[in-house]
Image (cartoon, rainbow, N blue to C red):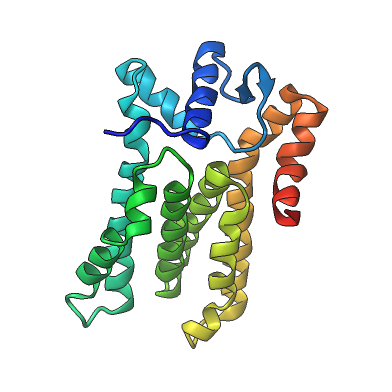
Amino acid sequence: TRPLTPIDETRYVSVAWEMWLRGDWLVLFKNGEPYSHKPPLLFWLYNLGWALTGVNEWWPRLVSPLFSLGCLALTLSLARRLWPAEAQAGRNAAWILASSLLWLLFSTSGMFDVMLTFFALLGARGLLVAAEGRNRNGFTWLAVAIGFGVLAKGPVVLLHLLALALLAPWWRPGLAWKRWYGGLLLAVLGGAAIALAWAIPAAILGGEEYRRMIFWGQTANRMVD
């Protein structure tokens, strides 16, 4: 019922609108200038929805709630894997997340945070699957989560997943740590390949400044700030 809120929501929808007008899915623009502050996944999803339903305001409003619903499902799955003997653990975890005020507020916003959370949870689930002995399956999901997490909000997804992955021999004793870290390396390389499939052609087309910002400036400047 609320309007799209300046500054963030209106800015992101306008970037998606320029992508729609230009038909350029690699280099992002805002007011005619290259826009390097965010990766492209959210804008791709807005444009994909518009291609299917026509240009409208309700589809950009729906993307974040859909990812929020996915996060609840992943929370349910994670809790059941962590506490298989406790039948109510998954339901309780999902209810706690769904009823948190901050989560409710961000679930209605046309921003990147809930989408990033979805891929962080997907990666965590992949790590649990790998820790159960299904390495190929689990690390494949981790690679997908890293790649699309980078496309969602940049390398920050590694901050959430790598600490969990590197400490796996502590929270899951008995792991064959050489095999584990080998699988983890392959998953990180696979995730990087997914992200670079966009970043490399975008850098070539976007020019030197755009290339510098998407590969280094955006992340480094945020850390410094």
The image shows residue 61 at horizontal and vertical percentages of: 34, 33
Q: Nearer the viewer, residue 170 or 9?
A: 9
Residue at the far left: name it.
87
Name the residue located 38 percent from the left edge and 18 percent from the top edge: 51
Quarter of the image for residue 22 reads top right
Residue at the far right: name it.
208
The quarter of the rendered structure image containing the N terminus is top left
Q: Is residue 9 left or right of residue 33?
A: left
Q: Is residue 15 left or right of residue 64?
A: right
The image shows residue 222 at horizontal and vertical percentages of: 70, 50
Name the residue located 37 percent from the left edge and 42 percent from the top edge: 64
Q: Nearer the viewer, residue 128 or 163?
A: 163
Name the residue located 45 percent from the left edge and 53 percent from the top edge: 119
Residue at the far top: name it.
21
Q: Is residue 158 above or below residue 214?
A: below
Quarter of the image for residue 50 reads top left
Q: Is residue 188 above or below residue 32?
A: below
The image shows residue 218 at horizontal and vertical percentages of: 71, 43
Name the residue located 29 percent from the left edge and 57 percent from the top edge: 72
Q: Is residue 12 left or right of residue 128?
A: right
Q: Is residue 5 above or below residue 134?
A: above
Q: Nearer the viewer, residue 37 or 175?
A: 37
The image shows residue 175 at horizontal and vertical percentages of: 51, 82
How many dots with numbers?
0
Q: Is residue 38 left or right of residue 135?
A: right
